[in-house]
Amino acid sequence: MSAKLQKDIIILAIESSCDDTAAAIICNGKILANKVASQNIHELYGGVVPELASRAHQQNIVPVVEIALKEANISLKDLSAIAFTKGPGLIGSLMVGCSFAKSLALSLTIPLIGIHHMEAHVLAHFIDDPKPGFPFLCLTVSGGHTQIVKMNDYFSFEILGKTIDDAAGEAFDKAAKILGLPYPGGPLVDQYAQSGNPDKFKFPQPQIPELGFSFSGLKTSFLYFIQKQEKENPNFIEENLADLCASIQKAIILHLMKKIIKASVQTEIKEIALAGGVSANSALRKTIIEEGAKNNWLTYIPAFEYCTDNAAMVAMAAHFKYLLKEFEPITTAPFAR
Ligand code: KG4
Ligand code: ZN
C-alpha cells in the first residue's frame, strides 16, 4: 500500500467515547476497515463503569488499530491524518483515544483531527448511498443524547429540540433493567418486543412542548406499573416479558415520531434521517419508513454497523474536516467539550 499515490487521503480514526474501542480506515471517503472491540465487563455491573472502561480502552486500542490497518492493507506511513472522538463522552475513555491519536500523529508528523461524537453519528449517513441532501433533519438517538438536528451543511447545524432529562437509549436501558434484563438492555427489549403485543399495556405519553423530549416520567410510570403488578403476581414480568417490551418500546417510539413529524411540518423539510445507537431498533426503523411513505419523506437509515458507536462514522466526519483543513493544534488538542 506504500505505493499509493500521495494525493490519496487516508485517515485512521479512533472512537473511545464510552465502552467501545473502535478503529476505522478511510481512503478518499471510502471505508476500508471498521473494527470494534466491545467491553463485556460492564454487563456484570448493570451499566458502564467509567474506570473499567478506560482500562479496557488501554488494553484494546493497539490491537484494534493493528487489525484495522491490516484489514485495510494500509501501513502507518500511508496515513494522511489521525482522527479521534474529542467528546462528548466519559473523560477517562476519551483521554485514551485522544492520547493515542496525539502520540501517533506526533510521531508520524501528520495532522490530528478532533471529531464531535454526535456530529459523527449524523455524518455516518455519508458513508453509503443514498446520501441525504442539505438541509435535512436528523433524529439523533443514542445512550446519551436525543435530539432533532437541522443539518445545513456537514458541520453547520441547528439543534431544534432535545431531551430535558433521559436520552431515548437510556429509556430503553432503564426499562430493560426494571425487567431484570442485562446491560445494555436496548437491543434485548427490541428482540423480545418482536414477539410481543405493543398494545397490551398503555403508558402515558410525555407532554413536552415544541420539539423537546422527556423520558424520565415514562420510566417512572413503567416502574410503578411493574411494582404494582408484581405485588399481585410475582411472575408478572416472566409471563408478560414480550408484551411489556413491545408496549414500552411503542411508547418510546411514539414520542420520538411525534416530534420528528412536528419538526418536518414546522421546517417543511422532507429529507429525514435517523442516527445513533437507538437507530438500530427494528421497530423504530420500520416506523420511520412507514411514516416517511405517508408523508412523502426521503428517509435515511444507517446500516446496522454504523448505528451504534463505531469509528467509521468518525472517519467519515474526519474526511470532510481534512478537506476543509480543519486540524487540531497538537499540543492543546482538547479531549472533551
Ligand atoms: O450511540 P450509542 O452506541 O452510544 C452512545 O453514544 O450513547 O448508543 C447506545 C444506546 C444504548 O442505550 C443501547 O441500549 C441503545 O443505543 N440501543 C438500542 C438498540 N441497539 C442499541 N436501543 C433499542 N433497540 C436497539 N436495537
Ligand atoms: Zn454514540
Image (tube, rainbow, N blue to C red):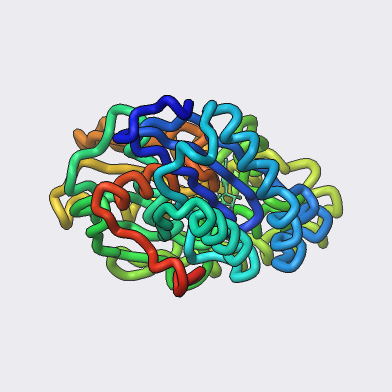
Image quarter of the C terminus: bottom left
Is residue 290 among the parts visible in the rendering?
Answer: no
| Quadrant of res 68 | top right
Residue shown at 24%/63% (left/top)? Answer: 158
Q: Is residue 49 left or right of residue 249?
A: right
Residue shown at 59%/45% (left/top)? Answer: 22
Residue shown at 27%/43% (left/top)? Answer: 272
Between 241 and 323, which is closer to the camera in this rendering? 323
Q: Position of residue 91 (x, y in %)?
A: 59, 70
Q: Position of residue 5 (x, y in %)?
A: 34, 29
| Residue lying furthest right | 234
Is residue 37 among the parts visible in the rendering?
Answer: yes
Asked if residue 91 is positioned above or below residue 154 in the image, the reply reads below
Asked if residue 306 is positioned above or below residue 55 in the image, the reply reads above
Q: Position of residue 306 (x, y in %)?
A: 48, 38
Between 112 and 166, which is closer to the camera in this rendering? 112
Q: Position of residue 104 (x, y in %)?
A: 55, 54
Q: Is residue 283 left or right of residue 208?
A: right
